[in-house]
Amino acid sequence: MTTEGSRAQYLASGATEGGESHERLDLIRDVLSADATWAEPPPQVADGLLAALAVEAVPGPGMNHERSGRWALVLAGAGGLVAIAALVLGTMNVIQDEGDNVVAMSGTELEAAALGEAEFGPNEAGWWIRLDVTGLPPAPEGSYYEGWVWSDEGEGVSIGTFHLRGEDMPIVLWSGVPLADYPSIWVTLESEDDGPEASELIVMKGRIPQVPEA
Amino acid sequence: MDREVLERFRLGDEAAVKVVYDRFGGPVFALSMSILGDHGLAADATQQTFIKAWRAASTYDAGRSFGPWIYAIARRTAIDLYRKRARVVVSDDVDVVSLPIGLETVWEVFEVRSALDRLPDEERQVIKMSHFDGLTHVEIADRLDIPVGTVKSRSHRAHQRLIEMLKHVEEA
């Protein structure tokens, strides 16, 4: 709507009766008639935010444990989070509902363009986890990516390494620990010169809301 | 916004995150819509904004105004999404991608929406019906089944409140 059109409509509406200042309202008239100004976020945004922050809060390498503790309480106390996470699945790109055994993986601020999925399932050796991601660049020479499963208590177990310097998608990783106890799936960037501990360079995260029976 | 809430937000408290979202979710979504023009993308941008704010909360000075701080995060997030999308669709050269609206307007959308969300519901409704739906006071009175005089008084109060709340936008 044009400013002149808005002004005419505004005056016709009688809104100036009472002495409001035309000059001040002129500044915002177009904004008041814009679609964007009145657009309401879908309720799933709030639900998704809580679910995403719950994933963020799982303690791991380099995490603020004061904050993690608060969110661990949130996770423990809010049984609805699983339902919340499920609500998010249908609407947010961050998490997608494509099957009981598929969870979304999203890039952290280190690799914000990375997106993908982790499919998982049990076998006689433990659990297989297949990563299919886009937007994650090849690991630089001398470094590699490492997959981890993490418990809510902050214990991490490596599930394998990869570098993405070739046509190596999807990547199949393996877990010998139950995913019900280690429901968070992370990918870190590691240096070949460092030890076996997880680095603080977490590039992707995902979380299994409810692990089916093996 | 209450300083204690902001301090708890800074520490990652869930209830505080909810309070902050309830207060700023609308303005952040409106800002995102003004840049992205798409509900799905704006929803993503809104969620990303609050996640980034939460990640960066330890750097927030609770003694300063929260609005401009989260506005800066929201604007940057929406612009990044817009450029990524435009780069895919239009060009590999990010520098040639220009925003659909000016940053001054983006700021006005954020501030106006913030002010609207602080109006009493009945006043906000009259403002919306008048400016957005394009109804006259008589038509609003008819729709709401209330006297025209009531519509006028609500409209008057609402506009006065908006003018007062948005003084700093005029002065900026």
Image (cartoon, rainbow, N blue to C red):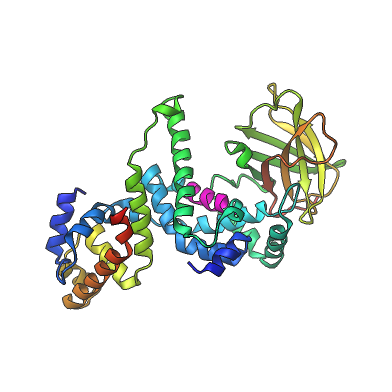
On screen, residue B97 versus residue A8, left or right, reads: right
Is residue B133 at all visible to an observer of this figure? Answer: no
On screen, residue A24 versus residue B89, left or right, reads: left
Question: For this rendering, which residue is in front, B5 or B87?
Answer: B5
Residue depicted at 24% across the width and 52% down the height: A30
Is A48 magenta? The answer is: no
Count of marks placed on residues = 0
Question: For this rendering, which residue is in front, A43 or B152?
Answer: B152
Is residue A122 at all visible to an observer of this figure? Answer: yes
Vertical relation: A140 (above or below) A64: above
Question: For this rendering, which residue is in front, A177 or B33?
Answer: B33
Q: Which residues are magenta?
A: B43-54
Vertical relation: B141 (above or below) A121: below
Residue depicted at 75% across the width and 28% down the height: A143
Question: For this rendering, which residue is in front, B145 or A36?
Answer: A36
Query: Toward which corner of the image does residue B154 lie, by quadrant?
Result: bottom left
Q: Position of residue A36 (x, y in %)?
A: 34, 51
Query: Toward which corner of the image does residue B67 lie, by quadrant?
Result: bottom left
Classified by dominant secondary structure, the portion drawn in magenta counts as helix
Residue depicted at 65% across the width and 59% down the height: A82
On screen, residue B22 versus residue B118, left or right, reads: right
Q: Position of residue B142 (x, y in %)?
A: 19, 72
Is B51 magenta? The answer is: yes
Vertical relation: A72 (above or below) A99: below
Vertical relation: A48 (above or below) B120: above
Q: Position of residue A41 (x, y in %)?
A: 44, 56
Q: Position of residue A177 (x, y in %)?
A: 85, 47
